Amino acid sequence: MHMLYDSDAFAVVHILANAPVDGEIERFDGPQIPRHGFEIVDKRSGKEVYLDGSWAEMFQQQISAWQQNTPSQEEVEDTLEGYATLAQMPVVVH
């Protein structure tokens, strides 16, 4: 898990679901499809959305574009606002 962005309004985490944890021995229990995704937390509403599959691929393309042409914080948050409209799950702290 890698924190990609953190502001007063949003947090974005890249989650590598099949990546071994530090010190963990990787076992092969049959075929596995590599999965990764992005969790976007809208701190203002207290909700989050998890992007995987084609949504994660589209978001990864957005991140790559940002790396090529560094956006302003306003541009990043405008983009995250669009994804935040998908957020339905309340953030729960365990």
Image: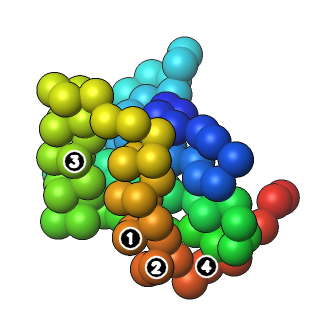
Q: Nearer the viewer, mark 1 or mark 4?
A: 1
- Between 45 and 35, the residue placed more toward the observer is 45
Residue 28 can be seen, yes or no: no
Q: Which residue is mark 3?
A: 62
From what the image shows, is residue 63 above or below residue 85?
Answer: above
Furthest residue toward right: 94
Q: Would residue 80 appear left or right of 87 to someone viewing this image?
A: left
Q: Nearer the viewer, mark 3 or mark 4?
A: 3
Could you say where residue 54 lies in the image, as x and y percent from the top left? 17, 65
Using a 10 Å C-alpha cutoff, classify the residue at mark 2 as few (fewer than 14 neighbours), some (14 to 19) or many (20 or more).
Answer: few
- Between 70 and 19, the residue placed more toward the observer is 70
Please state, as top left, top right, bottom left or bottom right, where the C terminus lies in the image: bottom right
Could you say where residue 44 lies in the image, as x and y percent from the top left? 71, 66
Residue drawn at (43%, 30%) of the image: 20
Between the residue at mark 3 and the residue at mark 1, the CA separation in whole angstroms equals 12 Å
Q: Which residue is mark 4?
A: 89
Q: Are marks 3 and 2 in contact (CB under 8 Å)?
A: no
Q: Which residue is mark 2?
A: 85
Using a 10 Å C-alpha cutoff, classify the residue at mark 3 as few (fewer than 14 neighbours), some (14 to 19) or many (20 or more).
Answer: some
Between the residue at mark 2 and the residue at mark 4, the CA separation in whole angstroms equals 11 Å
| Callout 4 amino acid | Met
